[in-house]
Image: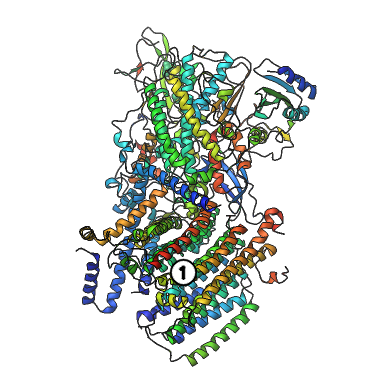
Amino acid sequence: MGAVSLIVLVIAAVVFSAGGILAGRLFVKGSTNPQKGQPYECGIPTASSPWQQFHVGYYLFALLFLVFDVELVFLYPWAVVVKEIGIIALVEILFFIFILFIGFLYAHKQGALKWI
Amino acid sequence: MIEKPIQETFPGQVHNMPGGTAVTGKFQDIINWARANSLWPLTFATSCCGIEMMAVASSKYDFSRFGFEVARATPRQADVIIIAGTIVNKMGPVLKRLYDQMADPKYVIAMGACAISGGPFFYNTYSVVKGADHIIPVDVYIPGCPPRPEALLHALLTLQEKIKSGLTREQIRNELKGT
Amino acid sequence: MSVKEYIQNVYNGVTSLLKGMRKTGYYFFHPKEIITQQYPDNRSTLQLAERFRGEVVMPHDASNEHACTGCTACELACPNGTIKIITRFDTTPEGKKKKALDTFIYHLELCTMCNLCVEACPTDAIKMAQNFEHSVFDRSKLTKKLNQPGSKIREGVE
Amino acid sequence: MFSLEHITNEVQNWLSSNFSSGWVLVWECLIVIVLTTGLFAVLGLVLVLMERKVAAQIQIRLGPNRVGPRGMLQTVADTLKLVMKEGLTPDLADKFLFNLAPFLVMMVAMLLLAPIAFARGFQLWDINIGVLYISAVSSLSVIGILMAGWASNNKYSLLGAMRSGAQIVSYELSAGMAVLSIVVLSGSLQITEIIQSQQNGWWLFKGHIPAVIAFVVFIIAVTAETNRAPFDLAEAESELTAGFHTEYSGMKFALFFLAEYINIFIVCAIGATLFLGGWMPLHIGSWGGFNHLMDYIPSSIWFLGKTFLLIFLIMWFRWTFPRLRVDQLLALEWKYLLPISMLNLLLVTLIAILGWHF
Amino acid sequence: MHNEAIKDFITGVATSAIFDESGEWLTVQAEPAAWKAMATALRQSQFVFDYLFCLTCIDWKTHLTMVYHLSSTVYRHTIVIKANLDRSHPVIDTVSDIWRTADFHEREVFELFGVVFSGHPDLRKLILPDDFEGFPLRKDFEDPINMIKL
Amino acid sequence: MNISVILFYVIAVCILGAGLLAVTARQLFRSAIWLLFSLVGIAALYFWMQVEFIAAVQIIVYVGGIVVLIIFSIFLTEQSGAKMPSPPIKRKLPALLAVLFGILFTARLISQYFTSAADDHSFQASMQAIGRQMLSTTDFGFLLPFEAISFLLLAAMIGCIVIAMKPSQADIVSPQNAGE
Amino acid sequence: MYTETAIISDNTLAGPEGELVINVGPQHPATHGVLHLVITLQGETVKKIEPHLGYIHRSIEKMCESLSYRQFIYVTSRMDYLSSHINNLGCAICVEKSMQIEVPQRAKVIRVLMSELTRIASHELWLGAMAMDLGAFTPFFYAFREREMINEIMEDSCGARLTMNYMVPGGVMYDIHPQFREKTKAFVKQFKQKVVEYDDLVTNNIIFQNRMKGVGILSKEDAISFGCTGPVARGSGLSCDTRKIFPYEVYADVDFDEVLETGCDSFARYMVRVREMHQSIRIIEQLIDNIPEGDFQAKTKAVLKPPKGEFYQRVETARGEFGVYIVSEGGTTPYRIKFRSPGFSNLSALDHMARGSKIGDLMATMGTLDLVIPDIDR
Amino acid sequence: MNTVPLSHILFLSTALFFIGMYGLFTRRNMITMLMAIELMLNSVNINFVAFNKYLYPGKLDGLFFALFIITIAAAEAAVAIAIIINLYRTHRSIDVDDATDMKY
Ligand code: SF4
Ligand code: SF4
Ligand code: SF4
């Protein structure tokens, strides 16, 4: 089946969700009023848009994640063969992880891991 | 305005729900059944009655038996507002906005004397709304100060009955006038 | 943070969490701890405290008589105007005009169950009842007339 | 012995004997669509009900018991109601993305079903990179949440989405590390091979302490990844009302809700597969009789039993612990879980290389 | 109680103060203008009046009276200080820089009685809606729409 | 035409359509979402080509990492909701011409040189093979680049932290002049 | 009547880098009612908190000016409804003081017993709500189990579960219920058994401790300056228990400790409340078997008319020092009543306490302040 | 079963490359430009994988190149965004035209 099954699953998801939403659309008539479309903020009218600048702290987490994510990607092929290659593979990966760990410690020291 | 015509019937009786007058199909019945059995309240409590509302959620009374326990903090996902407590003039617009922002169908229960009419704060106060139904339509009134938890459960059951009957507020009012 | 402290931290954290889970787990596996009372089903067996104040009622005896003289003491005692008493003048058999209760209006939607009216009543004509199932669809239903139609004052009450 | 494998084979045979090969594919697709949507619906209903019952039991109350027999129909009523509720779209929202987000979340949940082995030989696609596929696809779900949070044009939503964005991506790392330890032990990424490698015992028991540590890390990480308490900061009720789905109502909200539960099921299924041997019955060393007895229990029961055990564990967490603060949450990941799981991975490797596991 | 010592001290700071000991506590009638100096002195004196536990106002129809209840967390003695204000232009110095609790209390008195506290950092409405008119706790406050008289 | 071929063209259309939308969408956030779909499409293409490993890496790194990073950076720049102006015609037209020319030129080259290469060998890229080659130290091994990657990542990480953190420390001291 | 009034909140638009102004409340699960906070955030860090009150301002002080001295007491149970007995008690004592009514000893003991039960009930509810603020739902249910027992006791004797109106000038409204003693003892027994559960579930939980310790610091000086009272001030080491300092009723005769913690943080405030429950139990145990016989109510006139003058009475509610200030002109109704509510002062310290912490901390800090909004707005 | 000729895959990658190029030319916003670059890198990746699969099915070098390109793209994106953020702070804009007077 391979990739076809993925397509089938996507179709299933779409059918499922769309079916539900459409059923609701068909049978429910909502009332309209000017407040309904306003953003909810505990019952107080919103004054400013949420689409404004956020803090840089979020970026740092995404960045760290990205780096370690890439590392993780390289670990997968390593993991499947480590048993047959043996101790050399362990040494190789130790080196790899060690280098990244330095970066991690650096980030820690710089305070990048403090949440904002 | 409190000088309402006095009904001849004595209170404390259970109102007989008119059944079968409104023509509803089987499908509508099923939907009404679902709606009646899945009333998610908005977490909305302004004062003392809110504590009794919490008591209803607590283990001893446990409104989760009816499927009411999914209290939603956002009006978008809630089905019923239980106005538990006094509504003052400053709160009025907020309540209205919350009600407006709820997705249809939506129901309102006025819990306690304050929400029904201002209760203890009816006279001589400059800031209390004399009844939440001045702001939003109310489906079920439950008097008391505060109503005991069983009374709130009773109100919820009454609301369920109403939903199952499929009648609108106006129809109910007319029915009541007829009796 | 030394390595030892680090491990100590982890250990303490995990044990405290496990303790909490043991507690909740205990309740999960002991359903007899459940204290829920099933309200609408237990209605017939539900024991309310005898002093519980659910609403003001005016007891009538078998011959449809009550003890209210229409003295309006309760109306004055009530802090929020819940009671309205309309009196009329009856003529007693001796031909004297006597003030008597015509309508005892009770706004349940305003009442705060504070018991001040009952305390104030000189003839114990009203009392608090335990009834609490008052939910209605329309609030005009909550305004009540406590004296029954055709009722009159019990003999001997002054 | 009763097994789902027979049924699938039977269906396959029957189809191919009656139709041409092209049609067989179409029919199979249809069957899969129907089955998966059905599975979705049923899983959602059961899990939500289970959650409410578990919560009730822990909280010394009864929980839903009045709708249908013993409250069984409670979630059915809820679902029907949600379907029949108006789906709002805020005026100022990015309407396209707002409506797209629940679809995306659902698709991700659905795609994750593909490599899960529900029973012996009952698997949609035994992809050769099994667990890697799962890590990959599950990392998509964060996009759905970010999209929902951004498109709602609501401050709570956006804050909730940002939080869960940072949270989900962070915990993906230690979840990945925990998964890797099993990959190291079994030497394969493929789900069937991983299950086969546990023929004579589950990795949780075979892999000594490091495997247990990996298991604990995995459970913690997936709890966080699925935004469950105590890591439910994305929808922290007392802080951000409802988090990223504040503005969603009706069916669109139901889809998020459903996807959340399906995700729980999936991660627990993965956990059960990796650490508890999937559908493998419990075998203990050389106890022939005992092992034989265990074999009589159908493999699907084994699988579901293990999965639901883990699900129960996660629910148990939820109803016991308070929520972490957002910086503590990230500190937990970056200062504790990640270093621990890295070290643990190296330990596991050592064990695997030296062949110390059973 | 060393009321005498306190009296002596206060007379030293504000000569115009009038004392009254008929109530539970020593009551001092102060001039609004002298109040701020007196408050500062009381706070820093050896009596350590560091705790302002009640701040309110009374409308006597002819004038307004500010009432400050001061006490000491060290010696536990209490004094009451009153200052009469003109009803049409009630102005008094703020003490929110001496006792920070006065910040909110003064805002409350400001909106309920209309007393202006000069020097208050943030004298805005706290409780009433922003567009509320009138000072509800004054005796002549009328609100025919909202207030139903019994 | 069998299903696999149809699938290819569907995927191709998805990639190109989403890619086109990504570079023309007027809202930054939508642009990122279209980019995401384009990248997912490319991952699907890899799946279709049966190089599952690369497909998974594509999703993990690109979709799970880079796009998230881009989305976060969009949030950081206050313009996420604003519509960008559509590029002026004087920039659009030359770009369009250049691109069209490029496409035609390359297409011509491709059709000249790669006409025959339609194969159906079964190509297998098993994880074991990839892992072995990655860790091998022989001439064909990729151990060196593999280790070099760690340095690259280290450098990127430190660089980013240095660049992104510095001013933020400055404005902790004096929040007023952050805007300058 | 209700009029549509716009709420003009002075939200400023985008400030410096990464600042976001966000409304929390009036309808928000964490504000326990209708407190409205306008919070300025930078990232997740709180830069400024501006409380907006009045969403439950019911003008009780104005109302009381037209109620008689018997009537106005019932309104006060609606202010701090979790300490309604103690509120009523404060008013009753104040009226008694003005009229020089001598309250029978029995009534005094009953009053103290009821007050302490109320205090436990209030702290139980606070514990549950506080845990809920931190995201733990289950302690709420356990705490309510005990609270329900108290409610039952109350209902037996006072006739209501929450707003009892039991204290009247001159004593209490009814005599205690015959089963009062038994039930209270049963409660004390169960409480002692179950309270260790809270320790396992909440107090010793590592997540809980991490979220509470070092959060929401309020130094002793600040506590004094902000006029904080009750557990909030005692968590900062400020001794301010009215029951000890200015004993009323029979508090002078019973043996109990004033609970003081010096941590100044949220955890200290938490511990104060938990330990206070034990102290209350101690008081109850001392008194429950020693309720003197006698009248439960002094003979009073039907219409109360205190002489001209000013009267102030403070009592210790579960939240701190509650003051009643009655200005009497000699009439049947008070000329002016001022209620000094503990929450009002405690709330004013919130901005000071929570600045610079995370949103989650803000909620935890707010939880330990134990705000009852109608008490603050009055 | 696989009958799509290599040239079609190459057409796809060419088109994608030039779409990226178009974005790079027309957009002035640095983040979108970054996205355009990512698209171009991806088209190259497609080529590597396709060549490997079609022309050298016995080898894996194309895959490794693709893998390393992805990695490098990640590093590049991270650094680029760090620079963009920094630039945004000093100029309140992420437009390249505004950044021409960048002095550090
Ligand atoms: S009805 Fe009574 S208990 Fe309910 S909110 Fe009003 S005053 Fe409080
Ligand atoms: S119980 Fe209280 S409120 Fe109700 S009628 Fe009697 S006095 Fe009035
Ligand atoms: S009920 Fe009692 S107090 Fe009221 S009018 Fe009748 S007799 Fe008088």
Indicate the secondary structure of the residue bearing disc 1: helix
Let me know if residue D237 appears in the view.
yes
Image point 33% across, 34% down: which residue?
A: B14
Question: What is the x, y in percent for residue F94?
Answer: 63, 82
Would you call the spot at circle 1 few (<14 residues within 10 Å), some (14-19), or many (20 or more)? some
Question: What is the x, y in percent for residue F50?
Answer: 40, 77
Ligand 2 quarter of the rendering: top left
- Which quadrant is home to the N terminus of chain H? bottom left
In the foreground, C106 or D300? D300
- Which quadrant is home to the C terminus of chain H? bottom right
In the foreground, A32 or A7? A7
Image point 61% across, 69% down: which residue?
A: H80
Let me know if residue A32 appears in the view.
no
Is residue G306 positioned above or below F57 on the image?
Answer: above
- Residue placed furthest toward the top: C94
Is residue E28 positioned above or below B33 on the image?
Answer: above
Residue type at numbered disc 1: Leu
- In the drawing, does residue G68 fall left or right of residue G174? right
Query: On the image, numbered disc 1 is attached to which residue?
Result: A90
Is residue E83 positioned above or below F89 on the image?
Answer: above
In the foreground, H80 or D246? H80
